[in-house]
Image (cartoon, grey):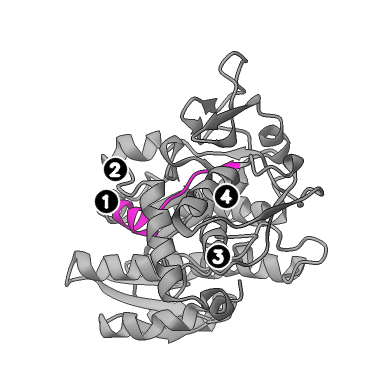
Amino acid sequence: MQILVTGGCGFVGAAICRRLVADSAANHVTALDSFRRRGSETNRAGLERLGVRVVTGDVRVAADIDVAAGCDWVIDAAAEPSVLAGSHGAATGRRELVDHNLLGTLNLLEAAARWNAGVVLLSTSRVYSIPALAGLPLVERRAQGAAAFALAADRPLPPGLGPDGIREEFSSAAPVSLYGATKLAAETLARDYAHALGTPLVIDRLGVLAGAGQFGRADQGIFSWWIHSWAARRPLSYSGFGGRGLQVRDCLHPDDLASLLIGQLARARGGCPELVNVSGGAASATSLAELSAWCGARFGPHAVGAAGADRPYDLPWVVLDHTQATRAHAWRPERTAHAIFEEIADHAERHPHWLAVCGG
């Protein structure tokens, strides 16, 4: 099977490439990457040693995609991943964001249409409505000396939300951030292309990915960035929500995503598009305060300040319910949050200057 992975030398894309090669000698993988993200070059040599064909190219340039002509599957892991992209003062402007996340996807959909190929679109939890998420009924809980937001057990939950988290039918009404809007629009385009052409389509809405070798920054890859920063004794502070680190996210290792993708590719059929949440789920839900407690036990004490101002688009509690993916593919994440944190911590000790390498 011929498979194109865009963003193939990124943290997630590289993990997918490695798993595809390991899964079957019949998988011939091309990794297309622009190498604009600092750190992505570190994955090139390892992928080439595995037999992955690595090509420098930009999804915004349709001709660059044609190097993989005739592929059976296109896995779109190339994107501007920051929720702050396009906002005031962000490194990525509005037009650049749209060009990367929407025009780039359109180019891939057109290429896949020419090749009659299936498409996997890696989407995001950020397609869900900001006002709806900001208004969730939350309480503060404490466990092992650290605090976190949690769903209030005695208050009604909005449609699409249950004890296990946010389901696929949760509101995606605007605003969802400019970043979220590009990903939601890309989902709509992909679904209409698949409907018109009858080709296979998989849309995976991802929670927070984390693991060793991630190019973590404060606005993305927060678990990796926090652990590396703690290990390096860099300044840290809690932003917003009273400056106490109560905000909660789930945590997923990219190898667990890659395991799901193997099953999705095997079962996908034209005319039957799949859209599911893919996450570490409620079992992995961790607040920054809880992560700090873990770091303190692992590395020793480190002061964390408090920044009063909220960051744009920050949310108190985002945990995706992966029940649909679990039922469809008998899949569930194998790596616990603490196992992921330990993997990152070990990487931080072996690579003390990693944040400088990846611009974190």
- For the residues labelled 1 and 3, the Cα–Cα distance comes to 23 Å
Q: Which residue position holds label 1?
A: 263
Quarter holding the N terminus is bottom left
Mark 2 residue type: Trp
Q: Earlier in the sequence, mark 2 or mark 4?
A: 4
Residue 351 covered by magenta stretch: no
Q: Is residue 347 visible?
A: yes
Quarter holding the C terminus is bottom right
- Describe residue 185's horizontal placement relative to residue 191 as left or right: right
Mark 3 residue type: Thr
How crowded pointer 4 is (Cα within 10 Å; few <14, some 14-19, many 20+) is rated as: few
Q: Which residue position holds label 4?
A: 188
Instruction: Give the residue drawn at x 36%, y 52%.
Output: 339
For marks 1 and 2, give the one nearer the viewer: 2
Q: Closer to the camera, 326 or 203? A: 326
Residue 105 has which mark? 3
Q: Earlier in the sequence, mark 1 or mark 3?
A: 3
Instruction: Give the residues in magenta.
Output: 248-260
